[in-house]
Image (tube, rainbow, N blue to C red):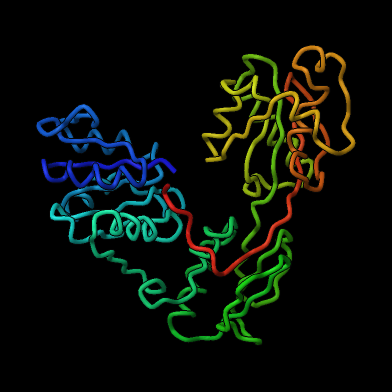
Amino acid sequence: MKTAIIALTKNGVRLSEKIAVRLGCERFAFEKYSDRETRPFSSLGALTAELFDKYDGLIFISAVGIAVRSVAPYLRSKLTDPAVVAVDESGSFAVSLLSGHAGGANALAALVAECVGAMPVVTTATDAGGLFSPDSFAKANGLHVLEPEFAKTVAAAVVNGEPVGFFSDLPCKNLPDVFADEAEIGVCVSADEGKAPFNTTLHLVPKNVVLGVGCRKGADPSAFEGFVLSALAEAGIRPYRLAEVRTIDRKAAEPAILAFCEKRGLPLKLFSAEELMRAEGAFSRSDFVLKTVGADNVCERAAAIGGGRPIMQKRAGGGVTAAACETEAAIDFGRKEPCFT
């Protein structure tokens, strides 16, 4: 995950170096204190505006008030805003300010605190009380929160000691003894969004679909996106179920594919022609594609590598191809939120 550290003072630059050694963050420093390993800036407001939508996490080595005022103009939603953490200049506290669960700020604050020997400060009720948090659970297990407003309802019920139910179509590990056998409010982990085992059901949908793609050189990004989304819709696959995009290594710099991945925050995995040809399964074959790239099929083979159940066979149109497989998934209550490493 892309994380930026913003330092305003000489000591802040020293702290940023300690954090970057562990997290591999990009470092920004006020121009008066910048060195060869940091990028200088003269306006904190302009820098924040530039970084806010480009990074998954922002670490301000500053007073909390400075960090809050810097990000305030750009706040939209906890589902899209980056994690924001403030570290005081003495390195005593690492405060989770924004997107604690969905963005991972609570986990980032704990990690930063470990780097500099600070105390993590987390104020979300579930984390502060060591209770079940649907947002954190979903993030750690690769689940899409379908109804964010119900996540608040579930979290409030947990904090207030009200019964909360749990249902899952996926295998579960380390299931805690906190869920009630009978409850009006509950969590449902399933790819079937129609299931409603509780009067108020929070659906957590597994993001376990891998998308294999191919396209002609220089394909138009908008046309590429439109075709892929249309193909997924025809196959009954929600875009938020995608876990990653795969293609042949020759397409590593293809603008249309990169734009699609960046827009949705999806990782891109690349495979050589030899790796694609070793994929197991029944695939459509193209002698032209084999002659051109060394593999007789790119999208289906890419999606199938490592196993998985085909749920969308090759779709082709406008110089774009796409296929999808559903991978096995399981949930583990022992998983922690993904780290920023």
* Count of numbered circles on the image: 0
- Residue 204 falls in which quadrant of the image? bottom right
Q: Residue at the location (27% across, 42% down)? A: 5
Residue 137: give x, y in percent of width and height.
53, 65
Q: Is residue 316 above or below residue 208?
A: above
Would residue 228 appear left or right of 135 to someone viewing this image? right
Q: Is residue 137 above or below residue 41?
A: below
Would residue 7 appear left or right of 110 to someone viewing this image? left
Would residue 13 appear left or right of 157 to someone viewing this image? left
Q: Which residue occupies the foreground of this view, 188 or 283?
A: 283
Q: Is residue 304 above or below residue 167?
A: above
Q: Is residue 299 above or below residue 308?
A: above
Q: Residue at the location (69% across, 25% down)? A: 272
Q: Which residue occupies the foreground of this view, 186 or 290?
A: 290
Q: Residue at the location (67% across, 70% down)? A: 172
Residue 94: give x, y in percent of width and height.
25, 59
Q: Which residue occupies the foreground of this view, 63 or 295?
A: 295
Q: Which residue occupies the foreground of this view, 240 or 254?
A: 254
In the rendered image, the quadrant that contains the N terminus is: top left
Residue 262: give x, y in percent of width and height.
52, 34
Residue 175: give x, y in percent of width and height.
61, 76
- Residue 291 falls in which quadrant of the image? top right
Would residue 69 appear left or right of 170 to someone viewing this image? left
